[in-house]
C-alpha cells in the first residue's frame, strides 16, 4: 500500500465538452472560412467546404480525411 493520494476517476472522453470560445480562433483548414458549432452532432461545420469536422473528447479533429461530407 502507498501513501499517495487517490486520484478522482477521469471523465470519459465522450463526456468532455467543446469550449465554444475556440470558435473565435478556428477556421476551416480547407477554405479558411468561419466554422459553426453543431452541439447535437458534436461537429464544427464549414458551409464553404461542405464539411463537418468531428469533435472527440472536446477536441476538434480538423483533418479533411476525418470530416463528414455535407449534402
Image (cartoon, rainbow, N blue to C red):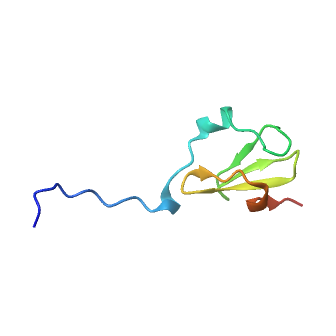
Q: Residue furthest bottom?
A: 1
Image: 51 above or below 19 = below
At a point 87% along the width and 49% down the height, the residue shown is: 49
Q: How many marks?
A: 0
Image: 49 above or below 24 = below
Which quarter of the picture shows residue 43?
bottom right
Image: 45 above or below 32 = below
Question: Which x, y percent locates residue 64?
Answer: 79, 55
At a point 77% along the width and 49% down the height, the residue shown is: 45
- Horizontally, is 27 left or right of 42 in the view? right
At a point 10% along the width and 57% down the height, the residue shown is: 3
Question: Which x, y percent locates residue 67?
Answer: 76, 59
Question: Which x, y percent locates residue 52?
Answer: 77, 55
- Foreground residue among 13 and 15: 13
- Horizontally, is 46 left or right of 71 in the view? left
Which quarter of the picture shows residue 28?
top right
At a point 78% along the width and 37% down the height, the residue shown is: 34
Quarter of the image with the C terminus in it = bottom right
- Foreground residue among 47 and 65: 65
Amino acid at each position: 500500500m502507498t501513501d499517495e493520494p487517490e486520484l478522482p476517476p477521469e471523465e470519459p472522453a465522450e463526456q468532455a465538452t467543446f469550449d465554444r470560445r475556440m470558435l473565435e480562433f478556428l477556421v476551416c483548414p480547407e477554405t479558411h472560412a468561419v466554422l459553426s458549432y453543431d452541439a447535437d452532432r458534436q461537429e464544427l461545420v464549414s458551409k464553404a467546404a461542405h464539411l463537418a469536422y468531428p469533435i472527440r473528447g472536446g477536441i476538434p479533429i480538423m483533418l479533411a480525411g476525418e470530416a463528414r461530407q455535407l449534402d
